[in-house]
Every structure is written in structure tokens, then in C-alpha cells.
Image: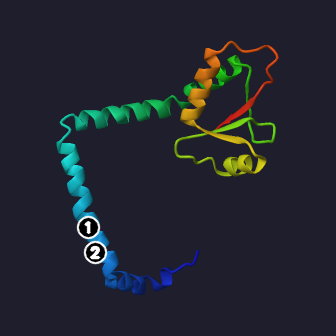
Amino acid sequence: MEVTSDRFADNVQEALADTNLRAALERLARGFPVMRRAAVDRLPEFDALRDEALKIKNHTLANLDFYLQAAVARIEALGGTNASGVSKKLSYLVVGSQGKAGSKLAKAEKAGVEILQEEAFAELLQRAEAVEPEPAVEREQLELV
């Protein structure tokens, strides 16, 4: 990435002279706030929903260790293990909805490990819990990120 801070004033003048950029910013400034306000106005319970969503987010973050331990317990109850790192022995790498697993994701992809989004992981657990496990099933390893 090229550092351009020494040309900041010139960059500002160039951006301000860019008619396409100015038009896009004006449309954004007029469009987004107006459309958001209209959407909020159509939903009388918006404030209550926003407050409830914040409570859920805060609860989940405050209790994340509990939820991760519960997921590990479900995996182990099905005969799987929770790995602490990525290797070719790993069956699945579970990534969050943002998909930000960093170097683990890159390493898993390179090793050919199957990548699961949280939703797919939940479905996999539900399907596995609905079926009686066979005694000779090989233990699978899973990494939660």
C-alpha cells in the first residue's frame, strides 16, 4: 500500500474535483438517511427491537465461553474432539458468520479441511444428534474459531 499522507491536501482537492465521486456522495447523503428514517418510521417497535438486539448481543458476548463449552460438549457427546489447532487430521473448521478466522482459515484451506459456517455446523450437529452413532465411527476433529 502506498502512503499518500504527504500529498493529503492535493488528494483532497482531487477528490473534491471528481464529479462522479461528489455525485455519489450526495446521493448517499440524501438516500441512506432518508430511507433509514422511512424504514424506522414504518416499524413502530424499532426502538424496542434495537434495545432487545443489543441485550442479546451483550448477553452472547458476556457468555461466549459458556456457549463454546456447550458446543464442545455436544461434539464430544457425538464422539468428536475439539482441536486446538489446524492440521490435516482436522475434519472441519467452523468459522463465525463474519468468516474471520485469519491464519487458521488459510491453513485449513491449504490442508484441504472442510470449512463450515456456524449455521452449517449447527445443522451438522442436529443431524448427528438425530442419528444413533455407530460404535466404529472414526472420531472427527473440529476447530471452533
Q: Which x, y percent locates residue 29?
A: 25, 64
Give me the residue at 75% from left, 40% from top: 85
Residue indicated by mark 2: 23
Counting labels gives 2
Q: Amino acid at mark 1?
A: Arg
Position of 8 with respect to 108 (left or right) is left
- Secondary structure of the residue carrying numbered label 2: helix
For label 1, the SS is helix
Can you say which quadrant of the picture contains the N terminus? bottom right
Tag shown at residue 56: none
Q: Residue at x 70, y 19 (%)?
A: 78
Name the quadrant containing residue 21. bottom left
Label 2 amino acid?
Answer: Ala
Colour setup of the view: rainbow
Q: Residue at x 37, y 81 (%)?
A: 15
Q: CA distance from mark 1 to mark 2?
A: 6 Å
Residue under label 1, please give it: 27
Residues at marks 1 and 2 touching, judged by CB atoms closer than 8 Å: yes
For residue 68, say whether it is visible.
no
In this rendering, is residue 100 above or below 60? below
Left or right of 15 in this view: 44: left
Residue closest to the eye, 46 or 66: 46
